[in-house]
Amino acid sequence: MEDEPRLISYQNLLMRYVSNDPGLVAKDNDELSETLHAQGIPPDDLVAMHINALKRTTHLDPKTLRAFEFLTRMMSGYGKEYREHQALKNRQK
Amino acid sequence: MEDEPRLISYQNLLMRYVSNDPGLVAKDNDELSETLHAQGIPPDDLVAMHINALKRTTHLDPKTLRAFEFLTRMMSGYGKEYREHQALKNRQK
């Protein structure tokens, strides 16, 4: 689903973003977002990575975790769609 | 971006899910997920709807909101991809 260096990059940028790091510029976020695309990470895996990054850095109460679980379920169909789209695009190349 | 009845449906199901409502079955979640697809809601709009539903029902501290803002930014490119995929599929019909 995800590899450790990617999760660490995501986690670091997320923490800098949350703490309003003045050294963080919009370009940094855009670059990570583009990298995730380039690596073909589906949107449900992105949500899973977001939750993992939060779990490592923040205390999440059971209700928050449960709400995230709901979002992951709602997003799972989009992951399927995303994989289908990648396959379609590859066929058109 | 979203209409009120859809947000209310989402919010109701989310709250039932979070509170472990024993009357809620997997089918209910699957149906909502399928409806969102059928209506062509992109994944970034789904995250936005999730945040709106949480805002209405839960106290979200500034850090949690900021972390969600980050996820929304990361997801925005997926929304673009999703719209592109819908267009591709429509052309192939």
Image (cartoon, coloured by chain):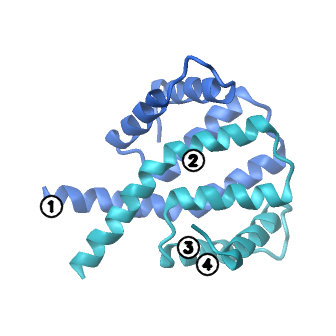
Chain colours: A blue, B cyan
x 70%, y 75%: residue: B4
Callout 3: SS: helix
Q: Are marks 3 and 1 on the same chain?
A: no
- Mark 4 burial class by Cα count in 10 Å: few <14, some 14-19, many 20+: few
The chain under label 3 reads B
Q: Residue under circle 1?
A: A92
Residue B26, percent from left and from top? 68, 72
Task: Mark 3 vs mark 2: give the one in front.
Answer: 2
Disc 4, SS: helix
Give the foreground label among 1 and 4.
Answer: 1
Depth order, front residue of A11/B1: B1
| x then y, percent, for residue B36 | 56, 73
Tag nearer the camera, 1 or 2: 2
Looking at marks 4 and 3 on the same chain, the residue that comes earlier in the sequence is marked by: 4
Per the image, the residue denoted by label 4 is: B31
Would you name the residue on which mark 2 appears? B72
* Camera-nearest residue between A71 and A20: A20
* Amino acid carrying mark 4 in the image: Glu
As shown in the figure, which amino acid type bears the numbered disc 2? Answer: Thr
Give the residue drawn at x 49%, y 63%: B42
To which residue does mark 3 refer?
B36
> Callout 2: residue from which chain?
B
